[in-house]
Image: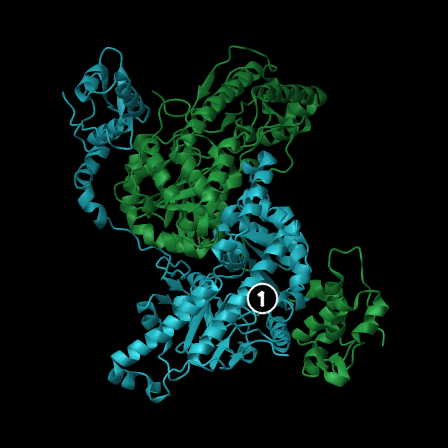
Chain colours: A green, B cyan
Amino acid sequence: MELPIALDRGSKQSLQAQLHEQIRRLILGARLKPGTPVPASRILASQLGVSRNTVVLAYERLEAEGYLQTRGAIGTYVNLELPENCLTARRPESVAASRMHGSARHRPIAFEGRAQTIVNDKRLACDFWLGRPDPRSFPLKAWRRLINRTLTTAGACLTEYRDPAGLIDLRKAIADHLGPTRGINVGPDQIVIVAGCQEGFNLTARLLLREGMSVAIENPAYQGAACLYESYRARLVPVGVDDNGLCVDALPDTGAALLYVTPSRQYPMGFTLPLERRLHLLDWARRTGTRIVEDDYDGDFRYQGSPITALMGLDSHGYVLHLGTFSRSLGAGLRLGYLVVPKHLVEATRQVKALLDNGHSWLEQAVLAEFIARGGYENHLRRIRQSYAERRNCLIDSLQRHFGDVTVSGTECGMHLAWHLPRHLPRAAELQAVAAEHGVGIYTLESGGACDLGGCAYAERTVLLGFSSLDERQIRDGIERIAAAIDVARTRTHEAIASTWSGAAAPARMPMAGGRVWMEGIRP
Amino acid sequence: MELPIALDRGSKQSLQAQLHEQIRRLILGARLKPGTPVPASRILASQLGVSRNTVVLAYERLEAEGYLQTRGAIGTYVNLELPENCLTARRPESVAASRMHGSARHRPIAFEGRAQTIVNDKRLACDFWLGRPDPRSFPLKAWRRLINRTLTTAGACLTEYRDPAGLIDLRKAIADHLGPTRGINVGPDQIVIVAGCQEGFNLTARLLLREGMSVAIENPAYQGAACLYESYRARLVPVGVDDNGLCVDALPDTGAALLYVTPSRQYPMGFTLPLERRLHLLDWARRTGTRIVEDDYDGDFRYQGSPITALMGLDSHGYVLHLGTFSRSLGAGLRLGYLVVPKHLVEATRQVKALLDNGHSWLEQAVLAEFIARGGYENHLRRIRQSYAERRNCLIDSLQRHFGDVTVSGTECGMHLAWHLPRHLPRAAELQAVAAEHGVGIYTLESGGACDLGGCAYAERTVLLGFSSLDERQIRDGIERIAAAIDVARTRTHEAIASTWSGAAAPARMPMAGGRVWMEGIRP
């Protein structure tokens, strides 16, 4: 008997594995029936032009798996103990497996969420994509040095499970960093290392939510948070945002399982929540028993004034959970962030983290701990803060140069700003399309990682511009291109524009160097 | 006015930060009322013996935060716009904050789970702790070389978000590894990189579960899985295990949202599910529409026979999700594993992973991809497989030498074995205590990362012995100490033992070199 086997010598799969797989399929497809002898290894090897050893090993494996059986003189045959009914039942499926695959009746999956927009694969020539540090700014030399040094003392750190809450040295370093920069005084035991803010949201959801509970959330909100809480089947209760951040008067009287808020710098608008509102917010939390998730995603970049005390630093009753990340100050490729919890939540948080993933990878935690403790992080922040401030200035200057008086918010800190489009310019989505045609990426709230949970006043006429990963030449060039693109569009479809853009009657775009700029945030 | 401020020059906090913090507390505690002028910076600096600049910067920060206000001639004073009622409302709390902290009324948190036992901080002198690779076996030199090489091409990999499903090179390398070693033929798109099996369980839970749904699970089961599914408020339906692994006849007729199973090597007993049961299991899955989570936690260590085709390799209808990890073959400190899903779940799985944590850290993914693709992983596996096989042999030999005929299971593969204690030895928990007194760590099911979900026949008389991280001398020494410990305990409390240990009348432990050993698993 010659078996219908065809080996592909160009395949990545070894000949032995191919042989094993094809015989297995013959048996499962009942083309080789139980009790049928298979060719002697020597014969099959000669048939296929392979070494005898290849066949022997494939047979041995099939035997170990129960497909074949060998008995002295009889030779090797398809196992009799393989129950015939199994094979019969499977025969029609196996034969028609490829066709039937799609038609198998699967239960609908339970998951109903949608994912956030954070990956931008199709970067344009000049892309004001948001929240990304300049890759050239990564402290690669120092990082490599620390990795090499850290690895020499690795010992069992690479092989063992450790405290799921994270490396104690890193948690200490973060606690030391949070005291002076955020006014948060906590011990390292209150800090849990997470894989960026997103895992932090998950931790808070697993800790505080059940299906059907309500989550108060600012509107517009960061997509990553909104999609996450929604995916746990929480009821989102949007709370409006104005030029001073979250409208604390609009918070639900009944409280919520948690409130998600970005007080240092509202995402995506960039407003900073003033002290008065912070205190009101904490009062509300206490009155309603609502826990607050404070997302401080880019608090390290404040260009004007000093750092603002975080909400958690003002909370003396343990209602605030504080989230920070190194995705913006160092890089999202590290997947490193931290969740700071009040003392009474320490143990439960650690358990949730253990269940989520048994803790974070060791090496980069150890390296980051050293980087912070030796002052490298502080220096790095100082350096990029300076550079980003210059880029921000360049962006504002370019906007003024091409569009005159511009209204922007979120300029005191962070890595992007929100440009509030005047009436005589197209709406955000249209402007985005026009700019993209000219190779410039600018973003609406929705395409820029935020979402409008209904009735957001800023949704239509706000464009988000990230400036941190572009140099000044690129920034100037990008804004100039947008201006030119608008001119082209205006010329090309003058009549159409007249009916679409309400501001067609407004003065033509006029380069001017002295335009004023209104910046939102804490004012003196 | 002199402010009641005391600076601690020994503190890690800067003087400026201390000053800021203390003034802030004075204002929030209403000890400095709105409108009250604060001392001129020169005067306060002189009072405290610090540079004037320190005071100026602290004031500037307080001003930025809205606590202080400066007006030309009047000087600096506590902000009037800070509403008096906020302060009044907060006064009693602030004063008594430290006392009241514990008494704040917090809602009970939603989380009700418990965490698994995977960290063993209190290692004994000779510890048969489970599932850990030998730290000395980690391929540190190759790893370091690959890290350094990989970092030179880092570019934006460290700073950008990437595909949440993981680095494509690593997914390709894993797909190529799974074909020949597990009989799983999938494309890299079907593979999602996870932070070890635990995150894999989470992914499956988020994908397939809602509160109250049922999860069929083998009993005894791996704690990490059982605790995880339970924490999602699923109803666990335990399915018994016998010497051939999961009792497929006992599967619930109605199916379940998912079935969790370890077919290659039942955790913790080590039984391998034979082909016949595998096929029955797949039939059941298809009949009931149940998805199967196949946890292949240490499938890379098979000492006898060839690798077994994974359940997913037998499934042609897309019911099996396959989980693997590098925690055992390389190290848990890497937090790297993979979930392989059928084609129709690719997109949803990627979304769930994005919501969980936006994907895994880049560097170690890139390094592992290279390590596998260049053959380093295969070599590493071959080396440690050989070394672990020797340790396994040494352990079995030592047990026979000291305890005569021993019944052990799970010896064909993996990193631990299960010793089924005979009647004349103490029960597992007692033996564990006796051994611990003599500095030897051995484990019951519960303390060894497994759990008895009710009525498990193996719970009382099974001891788990991990052999992979001990050398042969330690193994021999450890078993000898256990034997001696039993003798001591027997002598010390002879009468008590007589009533407690049912086997007190059995022959005294007798060293013998020729004891037989029964090994469970796939037999020829």
Across and down, in percent, residue B53 comes to 28, 17
**Considering the numbered disc 1 on the image, is that residue within a helix, a strand or a loop?**
strand
**Which residue is rendered at x = 42% and y = 67% of the image?**
B448
Across and down, in percent, residue A21 comes to 73, 67
- Viewer-proximal residue among A483 and B178: B178
**Which residue is rendered at x = 72% and y = 83% of the image?**
A71
Which quarter of the rendered picture does the C terminus of chain A lie within? top left
- Viewer-proximal residue among B226 and B235: B226
**Which residue is rendered at x = 44% and y = 67% of the image?**
B475
Furthest residue in direction bottom, as rendered: B505
Residue B258 at least partly seen:
no
Q: Quadrant of residue A41?
A: bottom right
Q: Is residue B231 left or right of residue A97?
A: left
Query: Badge 1 local density, few (<14 within 10 Å), some, or many (20+)?
Result: many
Q: Check the image and report above or below for A17 versus B75.
A: below
Q: Check the image and report above or below for A257 versus A16.
A: above
Tag 1 residue: B291
Residue B435 at least partly seen:
yes
Q: Quadrant of residue A424?
A: top right
Q: Is residue A112 left or right of residue B375?
A: left
